Amino acid sequence: MNGMRAVAVALLLALVAAGCGGDRAFTGLRLMVPNTPGSGYDLTARSAVKTLEDEGLAHGVEVFNLPGASGAVGLARLVNERGNGKLLMQMGLGLIGATHTHPTQATVADATPIARLVEDAEAVVVPAGSPYRDLGALVAENYKVIVMDTRGHGRSPMTSSKFGFKIFAEDAEALLDSIGEKSVSILGPARFFA
């Protein structure tokens, strides 16, 4: 299954789960993109809809753009609109970051996520000639860096049958206590700390 077909199938399954249709093709759906035409959100939304329509799973889906405030304008419309159960919004990490750095009345917590269409591969890159070979080297220039393997990863063995976020947090707390660190900033994958 190619990437856009997988995105469309994920969207279709989400629509079925949300009660937007049955055995027939979806009609009347409106997919809002809280960014400008041609943006990454826009291309993902339009590609998913084209695949749904090409496969006969949806007809006449309207994709429209409502840019502004890094997506917050679209989010506000979505959470405040009433009586339009077929209004969807395609969004990503950029909108989450925007509402975190510039707090708004409408937040992602006010909406209901029904599908993950893609998993963004976010990256921080430097020029090829940069002295930094990894993020740790950059951070170490101004901070003390403590690198911790989580239980069962890297050089850390599985020491019990317990495994999960609570255990990872307890392990991190024990490590910091053992080296006398009272206050730290954590840098790592968002899914790990969520």
Image: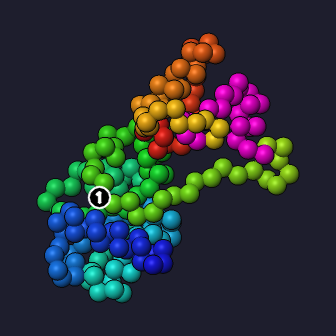
Any part of residue 24 in sight: yes
Quarter that holds the N terminus: bottom left
Check disc 1 and report the residue beneath it.
Answer: 114
Is 64 positioned to the left or the right of 25 in the image?
right
Q: For the residue marked with disc 1, what is the amino acid?
A: Ile
Q: Is residue 9 above or below residue 185?
A: below
For the residue labelled by badge 1, is the local secondary structure a helix, a strand or a loop? loop
Residue at x 21%, y 55% (from the top left corner): 81
Overall secondary structure of the magenta section: loop
Give yes or no for residue 151 being in the magenta stretch. Answer: yes
Q: How many C-alpha atoms fall within 10 Å of the one at disc 1: few (<14), some, or many (≥20)?
A: some
Which contiguous range is marked in magenta? Answer: 133-153
- Indicate the quadrant where residue 23 lies: bottom left
Q: How many marks?
A: 1
**Image spot of residue 77 (x, y percent):** 28, 54
Residue at x 29%, y 72% (from the top left corner): 12
